[in-house]
Image (tube, rainbow, N blue to C red):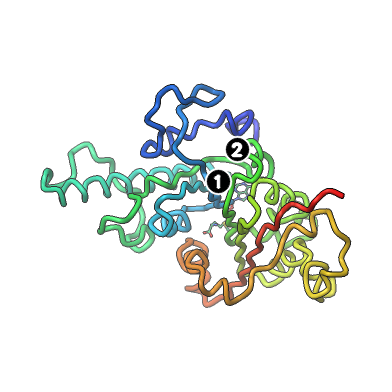
């Protein structure tokens, strides 16, 4: 339960150095409030409820200079993600050593790859940009501690892929898209940043649109939709704008979200539908 979750007192206390050793600032005098070494850049992308890490692994070579973190509440699943990333990093180091001609194979102390099917871990036999040094996973309940990890406007992208549907009405409060959580997402996302969602549950898709004020209870356009010009100014409803289908088609992250997460693969196998909605964080409203 939560009391066993480890979370920083504030973003300035978070030790990211152990997660991204390749991005630690070479100046050892640069430390954060907990004494941990600082990085050369900030973590910018978060996968909420990352599951087995397929999105991170798919995005890693696509955004090699961007630090990304998956947050997952289940211990065993997070352990798997961490060992998967360690194995991928090691494999990259070995491939580079082989390419440089100073090794003929894996050193004997290489840990075993996680016990997964080849197609689950993806094609990793080539040297990829970023060498998977830019991804990590942490255990967290994102419904409670997100602002402990990330400062105001720190993030450029948040992903919510195939969130647990919690079908029953009395369980809806466990959904990770909600009015209060959207306010937290708006706090940590920078203006222009994107919040990506995908689900195979049509009802959840409409729930998402409703909670970003793009639909009302009757499924009609909501305050952020066609009638937005009539909406009152200020307040959370004005912080999001729905991204167009044309823009989504041109965004490679959407392809990763649709086809690389473990849940997306399951939905593809079962020939299910995938409903995508992406929202752009607008500039903060001006105070009167
Ligand atoms: N995003 C992954 C994918 O697309 O393959 C996993 C989808 S799975 C249906 C939902 C995941 O969210 C589960 O792994 C679950 O443990 C995690 N999760 C649910 N609530 C969470 C919370 N409050 N904080 C962190 N992770 C959570």
- Disc 2 residue crowd, few under 14, some 14–19, many 20+, Cα 10 Å: many
Cβ atoms under marks 1 and 2 closer than 8 Å: yes
Which residue corresponds to mark 1? 71
How far apart, in angstroms, are the residues tagged by discs 1 and 2?
11 Å
Q: Which mark is residue 214?
A: none
Q: Quadrant of residue 109?
A: top left
Give 101 or 259, whichever is nearer the viewer: 101
How far from the left and from the top, in percent, is residue 26? Answer: 37, 30
The mark that comes first in sequence, 1 or 2, is 1
> Viewer-proximal residue, 205 or 155?
155
User: Where does the image place residue 65, in percent across and percent down from the top left?
Assistant: 41, 50
Residue 111 in view in this figure: yes
Q: Residue at x 28, y 44 (%)?
A: 90
Q: Indicate the position of residue 14 as horizontal and vertical percent values.
A: 55, 32
Residue 131 appears left or right of 45: left
Tell me if the residue at label 1 has its CB under 8 Å from ligand 1: yes
> The residue tagged with tag 2: helix, strand or loop?
helix
| Percent of width and height locating residue 45 | 53, 50
User: What residue is drawn where x is 47% and y is 65%?
Assistant: 256
Task: Name the residue beneath numbered marker 2.
Answer: 149
Left or right placement of residue 209 versus residue 131 in this view: right
Between 170 and 245, the residue placed more toward the observer is 245
Secondary structure of the residue carrying tag 1 is strand
Quarter of the image with the N terminus is top right
């Amino acid at each position: 339960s939560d009391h066993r979750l480890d979370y920083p007192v504030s973003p300035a206390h978070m030790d990211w150095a152990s997660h991204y050793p390749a991005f630690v600032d070479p100046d050892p005098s640069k430390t954060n409030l907990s004494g941990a070494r600082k990085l050369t850049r900030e973590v910018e992308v978060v996968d909420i409820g990352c599951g087995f890490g397929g999105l991170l692994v798919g995005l890693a070579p696509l955004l090699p200079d961007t630090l990304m973190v998956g947050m997952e509440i289940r211990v065993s699943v997070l352990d798997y993600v961490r060992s998967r990333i360690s194995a991928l990093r090691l494999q990259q180091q070995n491939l580079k050593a082989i390419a440089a001609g100073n090794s003929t194979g894996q050193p004997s102390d290489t840990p075993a790859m996680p016990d997964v099917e080849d197609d689950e871990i993806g094609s990793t036999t080539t040297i990829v940009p970023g060498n998977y040094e830019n991804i990590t996973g942490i255990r967290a309940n994102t419904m409670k501690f997100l602002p402990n990890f990330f400062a105001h406007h720190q993030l450029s992208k948040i992903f919510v892929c195939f969130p647990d549907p919690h079908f029953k009405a009395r369980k809806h409060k466990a959904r990770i898209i909600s009015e209060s959580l959207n306010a937290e997402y708006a706090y940590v996302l920078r203006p222009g940043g994107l919040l990506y969602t995908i689900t195979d549950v049509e009802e959840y898709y409409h729930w998402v649109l409703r909670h970003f004020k793009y639909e009302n209870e009757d499924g009609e356009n909501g305050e952020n939709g066609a009638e937005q010009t009539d909406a009152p100014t200020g307040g959370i409803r004005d912080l999001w704008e729905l991204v167009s289908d044309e823009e989504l088609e041109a965004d490679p992250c959407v392809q990763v979200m649709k086809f690389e997460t473990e849940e997306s693969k399951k939905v593809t196998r079962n020939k299910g539908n995938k409903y995508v909605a992406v929202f752009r964080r607008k500039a903060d409203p001006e105070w009167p």
